[in-house]
Amino acid sequence: MGFADKFRIKAQELRGRIKRNTGEVTDDKGLQARGRVDEVKSYLMRIVEKVKDAFRGRGPSRRRRQH
């Protein structure tokens, strides 16, 4: 996962957290829900990026072959 991807995902997570917290403070259930959706989307995007990295051989779970 590149820096731009990490930044984009983290920004979406933070936007979601801000929306959710603002919704809690203002008692706006719709804003809370939209914030939670953004947080879940960022979580899923992070998982997808990790899976892609694993298949590309860049993930922490992939071992290098020893010759």
Image (cartoon, rainbow, N blue to C red):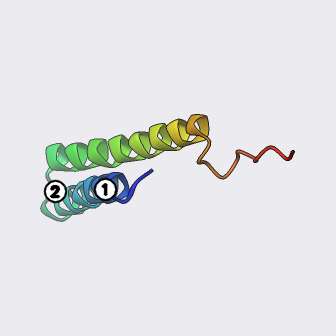
Q: Earlier in the sequence, mark 2 or mark 1?
A: 1
**Spatial CA span between label 2 and label 1:** 34 Å
Residue 28: x percent and y percent? 14, 51
Residue hosting label 2? 27
**Which residue occupies 37% across, 43% down?**
40
24 to 40, vertically: above or below: below
Q: Is residue 55 above or below residue 46?
A: above
Q: Quadrant of residue 13?
A: bottom left
Report crowding for label 2: few under 14, some 14 to 19, many 20 or more residues within 10 A (C-alpha).
Answer: few
The answer to which of 14 and 26 lies nearer the viewer is: 14
Whether residues under marks 2 and 1 lie with C-beta atoms below 8 angstroms apart, the answer is no
Left or right of 6? Residue 61 is right
Instruction: Find disc 1 in the rendering and name its residue.
Output: 4
Q: Position of residue 29 (x, y in %)?
A: 19, 46
Label 2: which secondary element: loop
Does residue 23 lie above or below 63 as drawn?
A: below
Q: Amino acid at mark 1?
A: Ala
Q: Residue at x 70, y 45 (%)?
A: 62
